[in-house]
């Protein structure tokens, strides 16, 4: 029986090869009709045998293109019009229609393109910019909407006849593949030395691989920016990179050709395999194996390697030319600044580190670092959400106003909301760096453009000195809504879980301004998007030297000892105190006592720093969270013991650190190994916060607990707390796509601003 139907499909269905997919599917089932882009997504008018239409419908969900995401399909009966054929209808008003289309993220090379890349018979054999509708750069090359070649950085490259024929053919994999290119018409790679002198060679990639093999450091331009590339098995090269980059400790990311090579130096389970092979090709943190295959300077004092697979054709060609087991592939930047993406800037800023430059002439419109993920016992942890994920939306449980949220100051991201979607930007970084601040401004205007949003509400952190807050307050013609830092953390987490019911929120992080003007970060709050109340917190300690205390954990060590013992702390008789200049100790003690430049903090991050210092592990750090990571890495998993967990019940419950610090000092005096002490400390934090949740549940009947804040990137704390809370029958909410650290804050800010506006 012949029938006619209309399918309206919404989600990520434009610019991802969806219409040609529908076209091919309709042909396969002998159906006629047409497919067109609409404001909501894609509309399919279809006629044919009922059976075939049913099969067609089933296949849409099952066989959809890899980059597409279907959020809804509405089906309507239609009148039979007697279509003769199946057509892809040109959008009549492309401009208007495409404005609402979602801009896809950048994706790794697909298996079809990879096969062609390595096939000597193919016309794109060894072409480093091969791509198709299912793969290649998107977000980083798009300058405006609609997603069309003329609005991308591919504009200067005019397609040759062969490429254009593919581009126009609905049966071809490259139908409307905007970055489509080949040897004849597309971008090219070039090799230079660090004085910008071209290296004469037939094959720049092969020569680049040779140079890396010889131990040189090469700055290689990729999708979202430059990488420093070196042979990870060459100890001297890796050490030189550390020295030149002035990066003594922070781990370098690695790239291997395949899983088999990764297994030579890291443990990888099935979940991690799926993750590392996924289209986004993120860096995945994998447990190190004992091996001397790799340089010892890659991730010192760390139990993990950050590893990824090749994601551009160029990466594959590098591995093809030299049989590298593993390469260093670390973001090329000046310390503290965003990844560098522009050819001239690269020469200007990276010549002190890189010996050679492998560049290309396709411009990167917006920088995008590699994303970093980790598979945990209970959840998938995002540490940095960037290339491969941004700007794909996070779907919210309800429609919201047009909001721009400006994010935090460190690990900044911004967020724009529209209808039920939240567009969280790529990782921008620490706004105190001028280059990052420039990227922040550029990302805001870029994201506004590609989402076609003129924000009516601007949300920002209540910290008056954050550059993101200052930016927000200078904006005109919009409603400004300040949001408290830890409220934003918790609401970001629950928004990802599509709820807005009251939760018990545990926010553990480094720094964030609280309502009493102190620096919070060891908090339990009861929160809904519209409001929150503080229920408990770590008791306050001084931060002698303010910001300096975050970089120098020994200052926090002194502060916690002072807080626990008062002036008598000097009699503690532990190595930590013996190893610091007594003069310096006196100065710090005086600063605390006289409250000179020593703001108060309840931060869990600072407590980790202080304990790390007291244990004699680290007095100064060179990258954020380094102390906490070291403390985590040495913890002895067999220890189940803990320190005294006390609390002082007041209107807002306080968790005194003194009993913990005294327990640690006593253990140190008894020569208990620091790995045992570290484990006991972790166990104590877990126990206290879990017990407090149980007490709060009795009082409030709230059964949902949301976890957020940078401290949850500590696996012992997150796994331990989740497991304990689950045992106590709590529903535990954790971040799903966004990081628990300040990179996730912008979403929370937006959702809070929407709720506050509604109340007004
Ligand atoms: Zn492809
Ligand atoms: Zn071509
Ligand atoms: Fe934070």
Image (cartoon, rainbow, N blue to C red):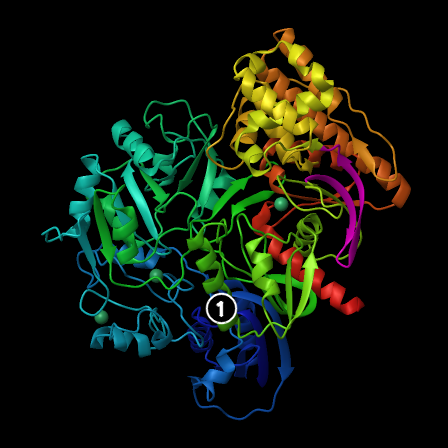
Is residue 573 located in the magenta-colored stretch of the structure?
Answer: no
Q: Is mark 1 on a helix, strand or loop?
A: helix
For ligand 1, give the image quadrant: bottom left
Does residue 1 appear anywhere in the picture? Answer: no
Q: In this view, does 335 lie above or below 447?
A: above
Magenta stretch bounds: 521-540
Residue furthest to the top in view is: 670
Q: How crowded is mark 1: few (under 14 residues within 10 Å), some or many (20 or more)?
A: few
Front-lying residue, 706 or 408:
408
Front-lying residue, 577 or 720:
577
Front-lying residue, 443 or 214:
443
Residue name at image x 90 percent, y 41 percent: 699
Residue furthest to the right in view is: 699
The count of marks equals: 1
Give the prevailing secondary structure in the magenta stretch: strand
Q: Residue 338: horizontal and vertical position, in percent?
A: 42, 51
Residue name at image x 60 percent, y 20 percent: 586
Name the image quarter holding the C terminus. Answer: bottom right
Is residue 539 located in the magenta-colored stretch of the structure?
Answer: yes
Residue that numbered label 1 is attached to: 445
Q: Residue 359: horizontal and vertical position, in percent?
A: 24, 55
Q: Is residue 641 above or below residue 649?
A: above
Q: Residue 677: horizontal and vertical position, in percent?
A: 63, 17
Does residue 299 appear anywhere in the picture? Answer: yes
Name the image quarter holding the N terminus. Answer: bottom right
Residue name at image x 50 percent, y 61 percent: 391
Mark 1 vs ligand 3: CB below 8 Å? no
Q: Is residue 142 above or below residue 231?
A: below
Q: Is residue 703 left or right of residue 415?
A: right
Q: In this view, does 45 lie to the left or right of 718?
A: left
Q: In this view, does 116 lie to the left or right of 138?
A: left
Q: Quadrant of residue 260?
A: top left
């Amino acid at each position: 029986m012949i029938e006619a139907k209309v399918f309206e499909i919404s989600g990520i269905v434009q610019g991802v090869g969806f219409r040609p997919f529908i076209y091919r599917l309709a042909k396969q089932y002998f159906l006629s009709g047409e497919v067109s882009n609409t404001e909501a997504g894609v509309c399919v008018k279809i006629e044919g045998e009922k059976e075939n239409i049913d099969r067609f419908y089933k296949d849409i969900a099952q066989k959809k293109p890899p980059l597409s995401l279907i959020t809804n399909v509405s089906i309507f009966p239609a009148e039979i019009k007697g279509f003769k054929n199946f057509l892809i209808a040109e959008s009549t008003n492309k401009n208007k229609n495409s404005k609402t289309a979602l801009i896809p993220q950048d994706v790794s090379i697909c298996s079809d393109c990879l096969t062609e890349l390595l096939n000597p018979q193919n016309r794109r054999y060894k072409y480093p910019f091969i791509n198709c509708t299912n793969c290649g750069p998107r977000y980083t090359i798009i300058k405006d909407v609609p997603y069309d070649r003329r609005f991308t950085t591919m504009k200067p490259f005019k397609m040759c006849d062969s490429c254009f024929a593919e581009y126009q053919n609905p049966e071809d994999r490259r139908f409307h593949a905007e970055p489509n290119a080949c040897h004849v018409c597309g971008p090219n790679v070039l090799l230079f030395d660090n004085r910008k002198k071209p290296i004469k060679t037939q094959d720049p990639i092969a020569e680049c691989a040779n140079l890396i093999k010889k131990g040189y450091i090469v700055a290689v331009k990729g999708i979202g920016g430059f990488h420093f590339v070196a042979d990870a098995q060459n100890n001297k090269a890796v050490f030189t990179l550390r020295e030149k980059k002035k990066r003594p400790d922070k781990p370098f990311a690695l790239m291997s050709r395949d899983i088999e090579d990764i297994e030579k130096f890291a443990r990888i389970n099935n979940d991690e395999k799926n993750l590392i092979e996924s289209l986004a090709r993120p860096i995945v943190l994998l447990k190190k194996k004992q091996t001397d295959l790799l340089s010892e300077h890659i991730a010192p004092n760390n139990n993990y390697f950050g590893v990824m697979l090749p994601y551009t054709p160029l990466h594959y060609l590098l591995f093809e030319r030299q049989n590298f087991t593993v390469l260093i592939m670390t973001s090329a930047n000046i310390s503290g600044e965003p990844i560098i993406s522009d050819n001239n800037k690269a020469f200007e800023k990276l010549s002190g580190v890189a010996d050679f430059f492998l560049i290309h002439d396709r411009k990167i419109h917006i920088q995008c670092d590699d994303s970093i993920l980790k598979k945990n016992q209970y959840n998938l942890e995002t540490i940095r959400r960037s290339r491969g994920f941004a700007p794909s939306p996070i779907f919210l449980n309800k429609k919201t106003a047009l909001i721009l949220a400006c994010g935090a100051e460190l690990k900044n991201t911004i967020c724009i909301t529209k209808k039920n979607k939240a567009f969280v930007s790529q990782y921008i970084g620490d706004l105190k760096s001028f280059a990052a601040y420039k990227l922040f401004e550029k990302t805001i205007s870029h994201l506004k453009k590609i989402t076609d949003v003129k924000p009516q509400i601007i949300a920002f952190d209540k910290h008056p000195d954050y550059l993101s807050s200052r930016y927000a307050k200078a904006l005109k013609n919009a409603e400004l809504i300040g949001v408290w830092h830890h409220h934003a953390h918790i609401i970001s987490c629950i928004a990802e879980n599509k709820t807005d019911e009251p939760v018990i929120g545990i926010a553990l992080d480094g720094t964030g301004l609280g309502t009493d003007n102190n620096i919070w970060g060891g908090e339990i709050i009861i929160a809904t998007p519209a409001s929150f109340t503080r229920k408990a917190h770590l008791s306050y300690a001084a931060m002698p030297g303010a910001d300096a205390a975050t970089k120098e954990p020994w200052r926090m060590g002194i502060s916690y000892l002072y807080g626990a013992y008062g002036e008598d702390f000097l009699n503690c008789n532990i190595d930590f105190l013996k190893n610091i200049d007594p003069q310096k100790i006196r100065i710090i003690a005086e600063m605390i006592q006289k409250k000179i430049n020593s703001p108060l903090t309840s931060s869990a991050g600072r407590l980790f720093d202080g304990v790390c210092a007291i244990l004699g592990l680290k007095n100064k750090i060179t990258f954020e969270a380094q102390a906490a990571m070291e403390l985590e890495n040495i913890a002895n998993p067999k220890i189940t013991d803990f320190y005294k967990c006390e609390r002082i019940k007041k209107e807002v419950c306080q968790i005194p650190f003194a009993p913990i610090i005294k327990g640690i000092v006593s253990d140190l005096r008894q020569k208990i190994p620091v790995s045992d002490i570290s484990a006991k400390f972790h166990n104590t934090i877990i126990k206290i916060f879990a017990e407090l949740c149980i007490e709060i549940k009795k009082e409030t009947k709230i059964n949902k607990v949301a976890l957020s804040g940078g401290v949850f990137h500590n696996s012992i704390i997150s796994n331990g707390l989740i497991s304990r809370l689950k045992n106590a029958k709590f529903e535990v909410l954790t971040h799903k796509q966004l990081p628990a650290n300040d990179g996730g804050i912008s979403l929370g800010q937006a959702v809070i601003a929407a709720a506050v506006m509604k109340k007004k």
